[in-house]
């Protein structure tokens, strides 16, 4: 009987009504108390929760827990879907509040010109009360739920502070009548209007609402990357059915269907090109601005744009299995994740509101017992309550992560989790897999030395013999012949000689093409090209020979050299990382000579080459590099790189244009580079550094704001109105600072 614990599944829930870091802590605690919950992470910027559970059918209980905690359970994409609304959506309550507060603030303006424009107390009451109890109802509701849960949040602080100001104004206005204060008007003197604080409470409520509205607008910009990715999905597809071409919803498309895509349309799903030839714009997926030519048999990715030709593709993946869905899921995972640095914020948030309430009480008692009126003491306590709201604290980290991961995705850098983002900026060693990462990954014919033939004659014969083979070296010969537009004769009687090469007839000639070892076994005289063969081997090339069988023996016809070529940008990125003080290492399974020859071409020292490394030993090499406290990033592209990617502090999976092993590498890596450009490695480290810098800036200002603002308010230097404006401004400034990341672009040369 199996006792294996089922692997956790993930449930996403939108959370409405959160306002600060304390709300995040409260929702997380409520979710973690539900039986069966493995972990719960709540993100204030995305207004969502991601819960790992062992029973995927418990979503209803989780939603009930959210509601019982005083918040509104929503659809997971509610925050993203909301962005389709007008930029002014939600401004109505703010506009009403500003209109009602304007007459209350007008006397302050009048004071600047020596004018007394103070409204009668009744008018102040009539203007301020709707703002306090109708527009501010959200604060009372959320604050009440916080009290029931024996916690505190921003809403509780605002509700307590503004209610105290409003109640003080009511007491000052009505108490003379209640306690029989003299009526001066009875003696012909004008009635004295007491100084009230209705305007302070009303303006604070309105300013907080304005700050939350501006904050919501900024949040919509941070989700721009996700929205852009969602918009790549067409709603319909042109299906080739029994009755001809018919439009169907993309959700009804099945693997194996044939889909027509017209010029200018987006490919609705992943597939393989069956008919036609076209140029495809994949920039939104890979960050590569230039269109890519696609011939029959080429892979097509859903979301990319078809160029000039009408094409037919066979569907290979639909729904959540498409590349676009994987990209969206990776970006969403990164934006929903909680960075390690956020733990400090969580610890502070857990005690923040109770501490603020104690400080406000001490402020009230301190001012009162030092001889000041209760009115003055209460106003200073209200200022403490208002300025201490921890909104900026809760937004500092997630806002920066959302902006950073979003702009990175725009340029083809997918950051899988916040931890990878935070660790990447500390990397001081980058290990590169050689084949397919620093090099093209496909051997090319780099040298041809004919004997008794012209270059084209020798190449045509070699291509003819290899035309039926799928061997990588054979494809290299065929590509070289194609590049020269040579006529290739179909071979006959072709035989593969295991471990040695190929033999067959091309026209009337019996040809053999294979290793130098085979030629030696056949007694071929290699003396005419021995020097060239030695030089080519020393350069790291794989050398083969072609010979012709005659009655009198086997005669040499040509020497062929094959080598993998460095990728454009590989040498530049290695130099760039070196300039940044980052050590670079190349890991290769090639023999030491070939590996060092490639390293020399890339500008690497021989000491930075790990050669003859078996695929299964790459992870051990990465672990060895981590010795001594080094922070290691591993860059690879294939399935055999997955263990090494997982073993590194930061794994970077580079997309393989042939698709082999890329999916496995993506799952093992924290960062995925959507195109095989080595320069993206430097760019990924750069956006990590900039994002972490923004997180630190935001946290510094959020902490500094409260550290400076609370004492100033307690000492009487800030009025509730100024405190309310500062509190609203702090949240907006944190969001705006994070959004500056959207201007980032990878620098040319990767520097």
Image (cartoon, grey):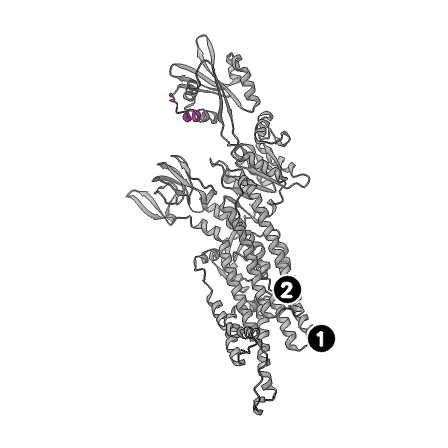
Q: Quadrant of the N terminus?
A: top right
x then y, percent, for residue 6? 54, 48
Farthest residue, direction bottom: 187
Q: Going from the N terminus, do you reach mark 2 or mark 1 first? A: 1
Farthest residue, direction left: 243
Q: Quadrant of the C terminus?
A: top right
x then y, percent, for residue 591? 58, 26
Crowding around mark 2 (Cα neighbors within 10 Å: few <14, some 14 to 19, many 20+) is: many
Out of 678 and 498, give the one closest to the viewer. Answer: 678
Residue 396 quadrant: bottom right
Out of 633 and 199, give the one closest to the viewer. Answer: 199
Q: Which residue is mark 1?
A: 370
Does dot 2 land on a helix, a strand or a loop? helix
9 in relation to 128, above or below? above
- Cα distance between the residues tagged 2 and 1: 22 Å
Please give the count of numbered marks on the rendered protein. Answer: 2
**Lateral position of residue 690 relative to residue 224, left or right:** right
Residue at 63 percent across and 59 percent down: it is 703
Q: Which residue is mark 2?
A: 709
Instruction: Identify the magenta region.
Output: 478-489
Do we see residue 323 in this rendering?
no
Residue at 57 percent across and 91 percent down: it is 186
Residue 139 quadrant: bottom right
**Lateral position of residue 165 relative to residue 227, left or right:** right
Do we see residue 265 in this rendering?
yes
Does dot 1 land on a helix, a strand or a loop? loop
77 in relation to 722, above or below? above
Out of 36 and 716, give the one closest to the viewer. Answer: 716
């Amino acid at each position: 009987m199996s006792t294996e614990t089922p692997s956790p599944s993930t449930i996403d829930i939108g959370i409405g009504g959160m306002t600060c870091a304390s709300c995040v802590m409260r929702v997380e605690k409520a979710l973690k108390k539900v039986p069966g919950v493995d972990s719960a992470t709540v993100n204030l910027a995305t207004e969502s929760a991601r819960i790992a559970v062992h029973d995927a059918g418990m979503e209803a209980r989780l939603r009930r827990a959210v509601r019982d905690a005083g918040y509104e359970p929503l659809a997971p994409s509610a925050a993203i879907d909301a962005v389709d609304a007008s930029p002014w959506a939600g401004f109505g309550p703010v506009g009403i509040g500003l209109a009602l507060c304007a007459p209350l603030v007008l006397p302050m303006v009048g004071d600047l010109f020596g004018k007394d424009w103070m409204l009668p107390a009744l008018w102040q009451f009539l203007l301020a009360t709707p703002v306090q109890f109708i527009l501010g109802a959200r604060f009372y509701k959320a604050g009440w739920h916080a009290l029931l849960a024996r916690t505190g949040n921003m809403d509780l602080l605002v509700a307590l502070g503004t209610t105290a100001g409003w109640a003080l104004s009511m007491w000052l206005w009505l108490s003379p009548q209640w306690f029989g204060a003299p009526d001066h008007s009875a003696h012909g003197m004008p009635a004295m209007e007491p100084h009230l604080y209705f305007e302070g409470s009303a303006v604070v409520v309105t300013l907080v609402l304005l700050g939350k509205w501006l904050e919501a607008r900024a949040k919509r910009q941070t989700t721009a990357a996700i929205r852009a990715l969602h918009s790549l999905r067409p709603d319909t597809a042109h299906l080739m059915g029994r009755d001809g071409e018919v439009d169907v919803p993309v959700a009804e498309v099945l693997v194996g269907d044939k889909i027509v895509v017209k010029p200018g349309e987006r490919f609705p799903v992943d597939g393989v090109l069956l008919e036609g030839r076209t140029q495809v714009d994949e920039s939104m997926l890979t960050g590569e601005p230039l269109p890519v030519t696609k011939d029959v048999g080429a892979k097509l990715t859903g979301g990319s744009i078809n160029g000039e030709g009408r094409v037919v593709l066979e569907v290979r993946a639909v729904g959540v299995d498409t590349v676009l869905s994987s990209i969206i899921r990776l970006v969403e995972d990164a934006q929903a994740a909680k960075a390690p640095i956020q733990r400090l914020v969580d610890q502070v948030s857990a005690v923040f509101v109770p501490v603020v309430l104690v400080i406000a009480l001490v402020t009230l008692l301190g001012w009162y017992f030092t001889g000041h009126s209760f009115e003055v003491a209460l106003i200073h306590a209200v200022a403490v309550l208002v300025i201490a709201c921890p909104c900026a604290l809760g937004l500092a980290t997630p806002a920066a992560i959302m902006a950073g991961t979003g702009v990175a995705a725009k340029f083809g850098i997918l950051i899988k989790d916040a931890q990878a983002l935070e660790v990447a900026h500390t990397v001081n060693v980058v290990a590169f897999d050689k084949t397919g990462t620093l090099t093209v990954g496909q051997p090319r014919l780099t040298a041809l030395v004919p004997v008794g033939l012209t270059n084209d004659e020798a190449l045509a014969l070699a291509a003819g013999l290899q035309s039926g083979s799928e061997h990588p070296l054979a494809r290299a010969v065929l590509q070289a012949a194609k590049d020269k537009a040579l006529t290739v004769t179909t071979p006959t009687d072709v035989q593969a000689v295991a471990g040695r090469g190929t033999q067959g007839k091309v026209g009337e000639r019996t040809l053999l093409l294979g290793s130098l070892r085979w030629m030696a076994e056949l007694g071929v005289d290699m003396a005419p090209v021995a020097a060239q063969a030695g030089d080519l081997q020393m350069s790291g090339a794989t050398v083969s020979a072609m010979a012709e069988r005659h009655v009198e023996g086997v005669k040499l016809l040509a020497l062929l050299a094959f080598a993998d070529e460095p990728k454009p940008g590989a040498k530049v990125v290695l130099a760039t990382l070196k300039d940044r003080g980052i050590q670079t290492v190349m890991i290769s399974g090639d023999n030491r000579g070939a590996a060092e020859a490639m390293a020399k071409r890339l500008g690497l020292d021989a000491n930075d080459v790990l050669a003859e490394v078996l695929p299964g030993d790459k992870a051990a090499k990465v672990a060895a590099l981590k010795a001594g406290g080094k922070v290691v990033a591993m860059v690879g592209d294939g399935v055999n790189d997955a263990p090494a990617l997982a073993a590194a502090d930061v794994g970077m999976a580079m997309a393989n244009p042939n698709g082999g092993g890329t999916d496995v590498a993506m799952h093992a890596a924290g960062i995925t580079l959507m195109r095989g450009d080595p320069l993206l490695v430097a760019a990924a480290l750069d956006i990590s550094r900039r994002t972490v810098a923004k997180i630190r800036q935001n946290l510094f200002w959020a902490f500094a704001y409260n550290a400076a603002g609370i004492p100033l308010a307690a000492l009487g230097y800030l009025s509730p109105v100024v405190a309310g404006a500062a509190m609203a401004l702090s949240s907006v400034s944190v969001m705006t600072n994070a959004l500056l990341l959207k201007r980032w672009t990878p620098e040319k040369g990767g520097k």
